[in-house]
Image (cartoon, coloured by chain):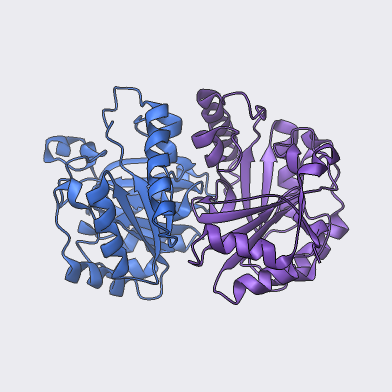
Chain colours: A purple, B blue
Amino acid sequence: MSNLRIAEIFGPTVQGEGALIGEPTVFIRTGGCDYRCSWCDSMHAVDSEFRHTWLPMTDEAVWSEVRELSGGVPLTVSISGGNPAIQDFTGVIALGKAEGYRFACETQGSVARPWFADLSMLVLSPKPPSSSETVDWDIFADCVAAAKDAPRCMKIVIFDDTDYAWAKDAAARYPDMQLYLQPGNPMVDPDKPVDLEQTTERLEWLIDKVTADRFFRARVLPQLHVMVWGNKRGV
Amino acid sequence: MSNLRIAEIFGPTVQGEGALIGEPTVFIRTGGCDYRCSWCDSMHAVDSEFRHTWLPMTDEAVWSEVRELSGGVPLTVSISGGNPAIQDFTGVIALGKAEGYRFACETQGSVARPWFADLSMLVLSPKPPSSSETVDWDIFADCVAAAKDAPRCMKIVIFDDTDYAWAKDAAARYPDMQLYLQPGNPMVDPDKPVDLEQTTERLEWLIDKVTADRFFRARVLPQLHVMVWGNKRGV
């Protein structure tokens, strides 16, 4: 049964963000999302307008494509979206782990899934005010609980001072969770080149903010893939 | 007794490289090095020509400056150089750990020190052929052994295909050690601006190399500080 809706499977490339930055990765980008962030950089995997481009696939078909892309050599597979947690990845993860692959998943924390416990990294990205979405912290806590002993971290995108203040409060809910802050990318048009100078300026702004504020628990990282490839898809 | 020679103490900023990339950090850059890498980007902390700029400091004076820069809020302190392992950091680390600070150290692995075991991260950077230096792997093994249970990783700078092939062999000596590869920066003049496009192109070259080669154990990261601040000192 073709139980999954997949926007794209691509790689190997390197993870561009957060805890696994620089890690060779094949990405499974799922189609569909329960959020509509104002600055979403992956609308082709979110908006129903693109639904016709999402391929219905079986667990086996997804796994077969990941294996082919990686030449059968185990690596980290990142399940992202959209929100991958609206779908069931139990089967794909089981197929991959049996061959020595590791799985990371990136989700906003709005839907909890038992398969979070099978991950080598659960990246929870609660969305700040600039997104225009609102976090349900009870469900977020369910997501953390579902991960059981699996490593997890929090990654928050920061566009402005309001987001930054919100991120500090959000992080305070989980004082022991590794925290990554990432400057927002306001240039999400895949057909327009990214301004590298502006991207590094935004990173510098966030670094200055964190260090001046002595908020030393936060690690500050850019979107490396945006610096290298702009908003191009499939890398 | 002013037992340490210090080129600069600066921060907080974020770590720009390797395992702790993005981590808020105060840097202690020591003066003096047993290597003379052809492409060294920190000659002001290496060459005896700059010796008059290295401040003789006591453990207490070094610690006092780190505490002041960080406002007494614990964070990661990176001991770099030059080669910090030619000096004795037992005292500084003890003073800092007593106040909840963590210490990382970056060294080429040419001198082993008991205080490696007190670190939260020992970054070993064996130098590839392009450096014109030669690694003594027996001493390198002594460094790994000295770290005991402390987390450690290997970081190798890659300028060309020869360096890359060498890095694979070097990494194979320590199959379980986390490995970071970093494109070399040929533009080390602090008075000249760094070409961002060229820097990202070199990163893309290395990412393509690692992924095409399916060398998935290597994480590929840029020098983030060079992308943000060029070769400017003290950031």
Dividing the picture into quadrants, the one containing residue A181 is: top right
- Based on the displayed image, in which of its 4 quarters is residue B188 positioned? top left
Question: The N terminus of chain B lies in which quarter of the figure?
Answer: bottom left
Observer able to see residue B55? yes
Which x, y percent locates residue B86? 20, 57
Q: Is residue A169 above or below residue B125?
A: above
**Residue A133, relative to residue B164: is it above or below?**
above
Q: Nearer the viewer, residue A221 or A39?
A: A39
Q: Nearer the viewer, residue A184 or A5?
A: A5
Question: Can residue B2 be seen?
Answer: no
Q: Where residue A201 appears, x then y in whole percent?
A: 54, 27
Pick the quarter of the image with the C terminus of chain B. top left
Q: Position of residue B122 (x, y in %)?
A: 36, 62
Q: Looking at the image, which residue is at 31% across and 68% down?
A: B172
Query: Left or right of B49: which side holds A4?
Result: right
Q: Residue at x 47, y 63 (%)?
A: B98
- The image shows residue A123 at horizontal and vertical percentages of 67, 56
Asked if residue B146 lies left or right of residue A226, the reply is left
- Looking at the image, residue A107 sits to the left or right of residue B218; the answer is right
